[in-house]
Image (cartoon, helix red, strand yellow):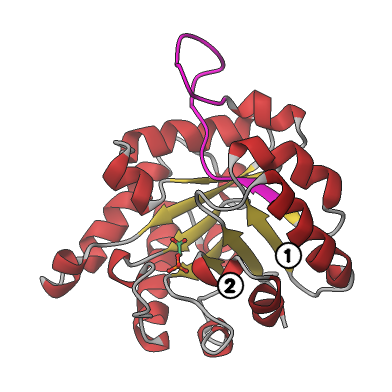
Amino acid sequence: MRKPIIIGNWKMHKTTDETIDFLKQVDNVCHDLKLEAGIAVPFVNLAVAKQHAHHLIIAAQNCHYEDFGAFTGEISVEMLQTLKITHVIIGHSERREMFNETNETVNLKAKKILAKGMVPIICCGETLQQYENNETQQIVETQIEKALQGIDFEDAKTIVIAYEPIWAIGTGKTATAEIAQNVCAIIRAKIANLYDEVVANMIRIQYGGSVKPENIQELLAQPDIDGALVGGASLEPKTFLGLLK
Ligand code: PGA
């Protein structure tokens, strides 16, 4: 059985004080969860979030694929590791669209994260136009194939994939559970094709895009959806806890 994993993606939200305040309200009520849960906070708040999180995963929202060097403004995986960060979101559509993230850099980042024994949360998903042109399968399969290139079977099993149709992010338009399930099944079949059934059955696939307490249950009831990557609804303690319930 795959353990569900729900991660709040805070994007560029919350100051240090707001982060501490959230964790004081949320972390201690998360002690006997039957799933993995966490929040991905901005870099500057990772260290303080780690200090206040005893049950929640604290994840980063990006990293660089080089160990060190002249990369102004960037953060290496080793820097995250020394903060005891275990999970890193990579390839989010906002980073692909606004910050030149490509399938190739996602692959380099995934390998670096895995080499440090950490978990990459690899995002994929199609634009509205691609969706309307019936290109979802081809786009998502290509993103997955390129992201996983050169990653061995053992490492592949530990990866988390987040399917996030871009037309559903922050728009209030959730993909129906049926659409989300279909694409997540396509992703799992692609992984079986790239690796084998064992790896495909172990990899966890999250759905992301306007997930809320009202729709999460139906989404997570789908056989190939093992969790959620949640933006807007993860910012308020009450709604975040509503998602975990
Ligand atoms: P949303 O964002 O839940 O606000 O749609 C999801 C995401 O971008 O990960």
- The structure residue drawn at horizontal position 48% and vertical position 26%, both measured from the top left corner, is 65
Query: Residue 18 lies in what quarter of the image?
Result: bottom right
Lower position in the chain sequence, tag 2 or tag 1: 1
Distance of label 2 from label 1 (alpha carbons): 10 Å
Please name the predominant secondary structure of the magenta segment in the image: loop
Tell whether 125 sits left or right of 38.
left
Answer above or below: position of 29 versus 152.
Answer: below
Tell whether 32 sits left or right of 20.
right
Can you give x and y, in whole percent of width and height, for residue 62 in the image? 51, 39
Residue nearest the observer in this picture, 234 or 222? 234
Graded by Cα atoms within 10 Å as few (under 14), some (14 to 19) or many (20 or more), the crowding at tag 2 reads: many
Q: Which residues are magenta?
A: 58-75
In the rendered image, the quadrant that contains the C terminus is bottom right
- The structure residue drawn at horizontal position 42% and vertical position 37%, both measured from the top left corner, is 107
- The structure residue drawn at horizontal position 59% and vertical position 84%, both measured from the top left corner, is 213
Q: Is residue 64 found inside the magenta-colored segment of the image?
A: yes
Query: Residue 38 lies in what quarter of the image?
Result: bottom right
Residue nearest the observer in this picture, 127 or 150? 127
Which residue lies under the disc numbered 2?
Answer: 226
Q: Is residue 232 found inside the magenta-colored segment of the image?
A: no
Residue nearest the observer in this picture, 156 or 237? 237
Q: Residue 36 got which mark?
A: 1
Whether ligand 1 has any atom under 8 Å from the Cβ at mark 1 is answered as no
Residue nearest the observer in this picture, 143 or 214? 214
In the rendered image, the quadrant that contains the N terminus is bottom right
Ligand 1: give its quadrant.
bottom left
Query: Residue 82 lies in what quarter of the image?
Result: top right
Tell whether 216 sits left or right of 117.
left
- The structure residue drawn at horizontal position 62% and vertical position 30%, both measured from the top left corner, is 115
